[in-house]
Image (cartoon, rainbow, N blue to C red):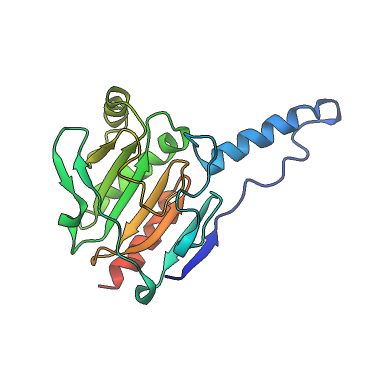
Amino acid sequence: MRWTRRRRGSAGAARGVAGPGRRFALPALALAVGLALTGCSGGSDAVDATGGGNFGFVQQAPGQDYAAPGDRKAAPALSGKTLTDEDLDVASLRGKVVVINFWASWCAPCRAETPALVKLAGERPEIAFVGVNSRDDVSPARAFVRTFGVTFPSLFDEVGKLTAHWPISVGLPSTVVLDPEGRIAARFTGGVTEAELAPVLDRVTAET
């Protein structure tokens, strides 16, 4: 599979934010910006769990990857119990474009992106949205769902076992788009916005 990477805009340089007498604040500011862009590690390093491999990624970065139809690979199996204790197998959604969002209640970028995902899910009923709550506890995860009014189901992946074979980063969030044949068409590393995700959904939907 060949992935085409399109980097999203960076936060820009930090110079000029603090005056000459406040230069000590710049390292902390740069660190905060970096964390906001790259997502929540949840581990010692925010690197690609796949180690690159066929997907060519090693270090987590805010970016978008897209695979042309002829280069796509089947998505790994993904099934289990949801946060509402129901059975869900993503394979049952074959025939639809599917958005899979990997998130956690403790992840600040996850909180920032969720309203856009909820909005798109409500506006695009022909597309299936599925969450994967990873490395989290049930109670705060359910509270997160209530707070943001999330209507689509989320698989509960307490220790990250379900996502081990997915081409996503250790850091959260990550979002993957499947085509109707169950192949990985696109992925977003870090928080995603409506302006970034909607055109990709249009593109993959138009292929059918």
| Residue 116: percent from left, percent from top | 37, 44
Look at the picture and state if 37 lies above or below 141. below
Horizontally, residue 64 falls left or right of residue 68, namely: right
Q: Quadrant of residue 201?
A: bottom left
- The percent coordinates of residue 42 (x first, y second) are 47, 34
Q: Which residue is at 17% across, 45% downward?
A: 88
| Left or right: 144, with 167 as reference point | left
Give the residue at the far bottom of this rendering.
70
Asked if 1 appears above or below 86 in the picture, the reply is below
Q: Quadrant of residue 1?
A: bottom left
**Left-right relation of 92 to 8:** left
Q: What percent of the width, then of the height, locates residue 98?
A: 27, 56
Front-lying residue, 91 or 21: 91
**As drawn, 99 above or below 202:** above
Residue lying at the far top in this picture: please name it: 139
Using residue 178 as the reference point, say whether residue 89 is left or right of it. Answer: left
- Residue drawn at point x = 42 percent, y = 51 percent: 168
- Total tally of numbered discs in the picture: 0
Q: What residue do we see at 18% from left, 64% from top?
A: 95
Quadrant of the drawing holding the C terminus: bottom left
Q: Residue at x 52, y 63 (%)?
A: 5
Examine the rendered structure and indicate whether residue 158 appears above or below residue 139.
below
- Tell which of 10 and 76 is nearer to you: 76
Please state the horizontal and vertical placement of residue 138, each as a whole percent of the image: 27, 26
